[in-house]
Image (cartoon, rainbow, N blue to C red):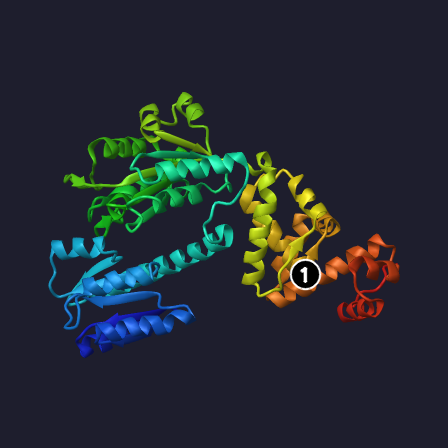
Amino acid sequence: MNSVLIIDDEKEICESIKMILEYEGYNADYSTSANECLNKLAGNSESGGYSALLLDIQMPEMSGFEVIKKVKEQYPDLSVVIISAHSSIENAIKATKSGAFDFIEKPIDREKLLLSIRNAVEQTNLLKENTEIKKSLIGDGRILGKSKSIQNILEIIDKVGPLDTRVLISGENGTGKELVARALHNKSHRRDKPFIEVNCAAIPNELIESELFGHEKGSFTGAVQQRIGKFELANKGTIFLDEIGDMSLQAQAKVLRAIEDGKIERVGGGKKIEIDVRILAATNKDLKAEIEKEKFREDLYHRLNVIPIHIPPLKERHEDIPVLVEHFSKEITTKHKKLPVTFDDEALKLLQSQQWSGNVRELRNIIERIIIIIDKRQITKKDIEFLFAAGKSSVEDIIAESNSFQEFKEKAERAFIVKQLKANDWNISKTAEALEIQRSHLYNKMKKYGIEKEE
């Protein structure tokens, strides 16, 4: 159940909001002290943390703006909704620039409160999910590899990172374009400021302008309140426009104008807003070909492509695979609380011989699958050949049919034993030898899983 923490120095308001939220099915907790609020956040973080924070601006120990600054430093994924009786445009702007998700005036309207909390909780859960996915895909964020191409990229990052110049990163899906963008940001003087990522391919064309530049209340159907866009949120920091080749021509024109003027305009607004952002962009498309098809603006391409960085596909840098396998093995065994795993030379050669259409992302997924299913301290070529032969669909079927990690392991182990028995014509001695276990152990496994020779 989603939990909301309410912080207001008036106990009656806290209890009133708590009652409203609990009636709607939320877990609600409150505090009348800013310091106690920070302690509650720290104490709750181990169990998954709160899903939203409802925060008053005017408090005796420290202001809501001071609290939100501390909260965003320690819990960047937590959505904060500011509430205040001292409503003003200045406060609303300040709250948003401080990282607040929304701003609500007192006296609090019940429907607006519930709408804001629901959206804030969804935002927090989405950010947490994305963070976990990124951790599982890219680990600690290091760019690994000993190939000449990767070393050249690292040299460019060292040279270009500290500058404010625009960079266009190209490469297939799964090669690590976001890693390069984050590395550039972390090398810059903007490293302590926001890094705002926008996946242009994931946002419908009719919403991309609102997402990038924000909108004013009432500017279109559904615009029930003012929204701050990604460019404003990235002010003083970096905005990363991922898959920019999928951006509509209309939005491209506005991005070009923002680059040229250093100003943006919200949808439905007439006011020019100054911005100071570094723009990094990435694409898996051939933008020159897109220009020929009149799907991408040539003037924007030249604006973005000041420093080009191309990440070659994994199939063109096989010498990086052993380094990546070692790194992913350590990361995955730690994640699943398993003993360390190594891959022998023949196993590594087999991995290096693959085409890896999904690039580094696919390699990591395969390594995780091998470690979970094979469940041995040293992985051999034969182990990997079995997994490749088993086919993607059978593994996916096991995953789909399993309701727990333990059930998944048992079903995968059973499938592996049956595969080896068939490969050895149901000869128990040969199969036990292939599995590197005693015959008695194999018999016990067969009994446990109800494995009998097929007629």
Task: Tell me where residue 48 appears, x and y as whole percent.
Answer: 41, 68
- Element under disc 1: loop
User: Which quadrant of the figure contains the N terminus?
Assistant: bottom left
* Residue that numbered label 1 is attached to: 375
Q: Nearer the viewer, residue 383 or 391?
A: 383
Q: Nearer the viewer, residue 348 or 417?
A: 348
Q: Nearer the viewer, residue 271 or 68?
A: 68
Tell me the quarter of the picture where residue 94 sits: bottom left
Q: Residues within 10 Å of mark 1 (few under 14, many from 20)?
A: some
Write the residue at 23% across / 65% down.
67
**In the visual, does 415 lie left or right of 149?**
right
Relative to 283, say whether 69 is above or below. Answer: below
**In the visual, does 247 lie left or right of 360?**
left
Tell me the quarter of the picture where residue 399 sits: bottom right
**In the visual, does 19 lie left or right of 437?**
left
Q: How many marks?
A: 1
Q: Amino acid at mark 1?
A: Asp
Write the residue at 50% across / 51% down.
137
Relative to 427, say whether 286 is above or below. Answer: above
Tell me the quarter of the picture where residue 113 sits: bottom left
Relative to 81, say whether 169 is above or below. Answer: above
Write the residue at 55% across / 52% down.
327
Residue 15 in sight here: yes
Residue 403 in sight here: no
